[in-house]
Image (cartoon, rainbow, N blue to C red):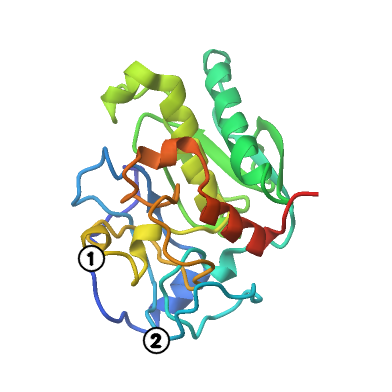
């Protein structure tokens, strides 16, 4: 996938070394998008996801960022929550011929995560090295983010999106606009700190075999089979729409719109 980035198989283990929690807090993780298109064996690099027993309440009040003593399965990595609600977005390598697809990405972010919360994505211009916020690179590879939430702040190529599908997921060439939209909606969930729903311990066993990337450490809602963040969703990427529980989780963490 991303050049120079090491990919490892992420085994389903009961516990990972405690030392790895510090790498996780630093945001040194890769999230790979495309449960329906990527090979099962290809999973993202993760330096941590410490699994600690805790309560399994269906819904919990939002807690401050910090090291979790809770079970490391859930919807969000709490330390990755953005401390600001206005989040800059910029493009590393925009070109005139990809302007329509960049507009689709912006629409996807604004129609989903922004519309249903207090989050506002701003900017959308060309990145400079010190531009704050989410840096997006356009590349014909599996879409992914290098970390969750605020750990993407100013990170070069922090999010990778595919507009051509010439090499990766070639079937998307037939429905390019939809694929760009749906994939972007999923990846912006990661950009706000939300992890893959199928990683949760309370997910069905047939879904947990698709566990991929960093797991969360806070169960915001009960398990959601319709989540846009769930590879086990029978509708690919939730048809590019947030589920009812996605919106509940989003508003718990970032507040309702208005």
Q: Name the residue rendered at 32%, 65% in the picture.
A: 203
Examine the rendering and report whether any part of residue 157 can be seen. Answer: no
Q: x%, y% of residue 135?
A: 58, 42
Classify mark 1: residues with Cα within 10 Å, few (<14), some (14-19) or many (20+). few
In the rendered structure, which disc, 2 or 1, sits on the residue that comes first in sequence?
A: 2
Task: Please indicate, yes or no, whether residue 243 appears anywhere in the rendered image.
Answer: yes
SS state under label 1: helix
Q: Are marks 2 and 1 in contact (CB under 8 Å)?
A: no
- The residue located at (38%, 20%) in the rendering is 175
Residue under the image location 63 percent in, 74 percent down: 65
Left or right: 107 in relation to 16: right
Relative depth, front residue between 143 and 113: 113
| Rendered position, 184 above or below 205 | above
* Residue 53: numbered disc: 2
Residue closest to the far top:
97
In the image, which is nearer the foreground, mark 2 or mark 1?
A: 1
Query: How many tags in the picture?
Result: 2
Closer-to-camera residue (243/5): 243
Q: Which residue is mark 1?
A: 205
Answer left or right for 153 relative to 172: right
Residue 128 at x, y = what percent?
66, 38
Up/down of 82 relative to 163, above or below:
below
Report, in whole angstroms, how far the alpha carbon at label 2 lies from the one at label 1. 18 Å
**Where residue 149 appears, x then y in whole percent?**
57, 57
Assign a secondary structure to mark 2: loop
In the rendered image, the vertical position of residue 56 relative to residue 255, given as above or below: below
* Residue 179: percent from left, percent from top: 41, 28
Which residue is rendered at x = 44% and y = 86% of the image? 54
In the image, residue 241 above or below residue 97? below
Circle number at residue 45? none
């Amino acid at each position: 996938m991303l050049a120079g980035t090491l990919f490892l198989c992420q085994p389903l283990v009961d516990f990972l070394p405690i030392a790895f929690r510090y790498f996780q807090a630093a945001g040194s993780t890769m999230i790979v998008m495309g449960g329906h298109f990527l090979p099962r064996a290809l999973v993202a690099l993760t330096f941590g996801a410490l699994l600690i027993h805790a309560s399994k309440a269906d819904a919990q009040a939002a807690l401050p960022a910090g090291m979790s003593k809770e079970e490391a399965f859930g919807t969000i990595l709490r330390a990755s929550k953005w401390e600001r609600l206005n989040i800059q977005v910029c493009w590393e390598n925009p070109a005139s011929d990809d302007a329509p697809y960049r507009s689709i990405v912006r629409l996807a972010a604004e129609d989903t995560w922004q519309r249903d919360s207090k989050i506002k994505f701003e900017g959308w211009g060309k990145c400079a090295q010190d531009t704050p916020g989410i840096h997006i690179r356009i590349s014909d590879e599996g879409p992914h983010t290098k970390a969750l939430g605020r750990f993407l702040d100013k990170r070069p190529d922090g999010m990778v999106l595919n507009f051509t599908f010439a090499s990766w997921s070639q079937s998307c060439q037939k429905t390019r606009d939809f694929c760009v939209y749906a994939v972007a909606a999923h990846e912006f969930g990661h950009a706000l700190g939300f992890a893959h729903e199928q990683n949760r311990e309370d997910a069905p066993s047939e879904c947990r075999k698709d566990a991929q990337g960093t797991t969360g450490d806070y169960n915001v809602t009960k398990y959601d089979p319709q989540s846009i963040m769930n590879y086990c969703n029978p509708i690919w990427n939730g048809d590019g729409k947030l589920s009812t529980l996605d919106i509940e989780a989003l508003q718990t963490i970032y507040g309702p719109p208005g």
